[in-house]
Image (tube, grey):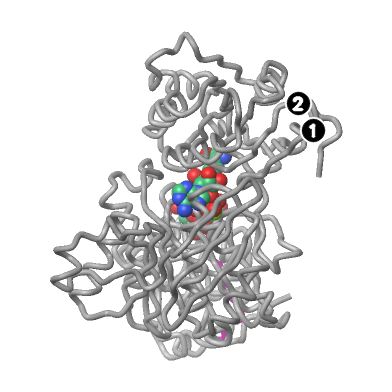
Amino acid sequence: MIKFMPTTLQALSIVAPDHAAANCKVMGLSSDSRHVQPGDLFVARDGITHRGVDFIEQAVDAGAIAAVVEAWTTSQDDLSCFGIPVIRIENLADKAGVFAAAMLGQPSTKMTLIGVTGTNGKTSCAHYIAQALTALGTKTALIGTVGNGFPDALNTATHTTPDAITVQRLLSDFYAQGAQAVVMEVSSHALDQGRVSGVQFDVVALTNLSRDHLDYHGSMDAYAEAKSLLFTTKNVAIGVVHKKRNIVLNADDDFGRQLARQLTAGNVPFCLFSSDLNNTQLTNTELNSGVLKQADVAVNQCVLSRLGVQLSLTIPGGRVRFEAPVVGDFNVSNLLLTVSVLSQLDLSAAQIEMAMAQVSAVPGRMECLTCAGRPAVVIDYAHTPDALEKALLAARKHCSQQLWIVFGCGGDRDTGKRAEMAAIAEQFADRVVVTSDNPRTESPDAIIEMIMRGFNRPGQVVTLADRYEAINMAMQQASAEDLVLVAGKGHEDYQEIMGVKYPFSDKVVVESLLGDVDA
Ligand SMILES: CC(=O)N[C@H]1[C@@H](OP(=O)(O)OP(=O)(O)OC[C@H]2O[C@@H](n3ccc(=O)[nH]c3=O)[C@H](O)[C@@H]2O)O[C@H](CO)[C@@H](O)[C@@H]1O[C@H](C)C(=O)N[C@@H](C)C(=O)N[C@H](CCC(=O)O)C(=O)O
Ligand SMILES: Nc1ncnc2c1ncn2[C@@H]1O[C@H](COP(=O)(O)OP(=O)(O)OP(=O)(O)O)[C@@H](O)[C@H]1O
Ligand SMILES: N[C@H](CCC[C@H](N)C(=O)O)C(=O)O
Ligand SMILES: [Mg+2]
């Protein structure tokens, strides 16, 4: 159990109203009134749904000795009634992590910290990096969608990137358990809400940027702006911190190149990777004028097979060759990112080659289940238009006859991606079954109806809201030479309906329907 180091408001650089308040002992920190412990400083941050100030009374009842609130939301006059010092602070959302880091002894400075952001591929890359570092003997922990902890003992995660105080607690906990490195997925929500403020990174990397989360960010520009926060250094008092400027960018992605141009203009060094053999995305004009450089990590040779990928790469100062049992062209990009991160950690070509040979598939990402005489089934976490396209293109290469897709879309999330995913499904699959994903608080039928608007030939699409029945139907009707891609839920072991998480696993369902699954 991780303990905060007792401190004072003064030591946290919080300007208290009087001497007594400045020196009162702060025993812990919480941003949730329901979890406040006696002696805690309550970080009453404003959220999207609630105002933090509305929970101060509850925090006082639980024993909070002081509270901090957003400066712009409340006047000082309204804060004198709580019986504890309540102090107004600028940019409070960005400060919670900084306070927590201070009270936990700056855990991120004691380990190698790697942050991965981007629309798709964060989990895959984070796991590959953790597997590679572990193979090199570096005890490495993970924070991300599949779970938090050491790779062989992940605790289920509620978020891809937890809230700011939880992030610091996890880092502190990992350090206490001997971690030497931590790889974390950094979501756009996290960057926007200051969940990684106070984390000091050794390497930060971008996978790619495509449509997602527009319900939250409102526009692609705002979404990109949030992502770019991981790559801009701020001072230690606020925001993301870079120990060194080790930045890894994807030259095959529009946003990756945009960031690369910005960094070049600001004379900030970065490592660029590309799986484009001819660097066709990098225009000659840009290359010749020095606006962009050639990729630092690039593909010399790439052989994709049913079992995985064989790669020969150029890296700064050498070459590496390895095989990895992961499928899909998009995974080449994820492997390149992984190699780029390792090269930024100053590992030798021989070390990188050895480490990459140990990389293996991630649960729920292009996971293939087969049984003699039955259609092959691939379970994948594609839940954005770009991911669905990439997953279907990858699955097509493993399918000798008809390619089936079973998918739905999550409720209470970007509604605009629903019709886009339908158009992709229609374009790249032969048979389409639309079902429920996590409807959350929305009606499954209403979500399906929005998906249906994206098809040109809706008459050819089967809809079955019950996900078990939808998978069953596709597997019953598909021939042994067909392939069924079950997309959207990957590793998830629940289906969230009206605030309740019911047990549901695509993998368990498929295995039970296949009977004896081949290895
Ligand atoms: C949209 C979003 O990101 N919402 C997150 C946000 O909620 P919110 O802003 O509505 O918070 P709020 O309910 O207004 O509460 C404000 C403050 O009051 C506190 N509070 C609240 C209630 C109470 O009784 N007492 C109390 O003190 C809360 O702890 C919070 O600090 O802050 C909450 C506390 O940290 C998060 O749990 C919540 O995540 C919700 C559940 C969520 O679904 N988030 C998803 C969209 C998300 O974060 N996804 C990303 C990206 C996924 C990916 O692409 O991989 C992720 O990183 O997981
Ligand atoms: N580099 C990539 N480019 C495009 N699609 C990808 C890439 N890597 C993975 N995918 C697709 O995206 C899906 C999700 O991959 P992964 O879980 O690694 O991404 P993520 O960014 O962590 O997603 P989330 O934001 O939901 O946590 C995969 O199942 C696959 O279909
Ligand atoms: N990290 C993603 C997960 C989506 C998973 C999908 N199954 C869904 O419920 O939409 C998100 O929060 O948008
Ligand atoms: Mg993830």
Residue 371 is marked as 1
* Quadrant in the picture for the C terminus: top right
Q: Residue reaching furthest right?
A: 516
Q: Which residues are magenta?
A: 24-30
From the Cβ of disc 1, is ligand 2 less than 8 Å away? Answer: no
Q: Residue at x 47, y 84 (%)?
A: 9
Q: Please, what secondary structure does the residue beneath circle 1 have? A: loop
Total numbered circles = 2
CA neighbours of label 2 inside 10 A, class few (<14), some (14 to 19), many (20+):
some
Q: Please, is residue 103 above or below residue 188 in the view?
A: below
Q: What percent of the width, then of the height, locates residue 386?
A: 42, 41
Q: What percent of the width, then of the height, locates residue 222?
A: 28, 52
Residue 277 is marked as none
Task: Indicate left or right for 407 with 415 as reference.
Answer: right
Q: Are marks 1 and 2 in contact (CB under 8 Å)?
A: yes
Q: What percent of the width, then of the height, locates residue 179?
A: 67, 80
Amino acid type, residue under disc 2 in the picture = Arg
CA neighbours of label 1 inside 10 A, class few (<14), some (14 to 19), many (20+):
some
Residue receiving disc 2:
374
Q: Please, is residue 351 above or below residue 228 in the view?
A: below
Q: What percent of the width, then of the height, locates residue 347?
A: 54, 84
* Residue 171 appears in the rendering: yes
Does residue 236 belong to the magenta stretch? no
Tell me the quarter of the picture where residue 180 sits.
Answer: bottom right
Foreground residue, 395 or 142?
395
Task: Examine the residues drawn in magenta and state their main secondary structure.
Answer: strand
Q: CA distance from mark 1 to mark 2?
A: 6 Å
Amino acid type, residue under disc 1 in the picture = Cys
Task: Indicate left or right for 236 with 219 as reference.
Answer: right
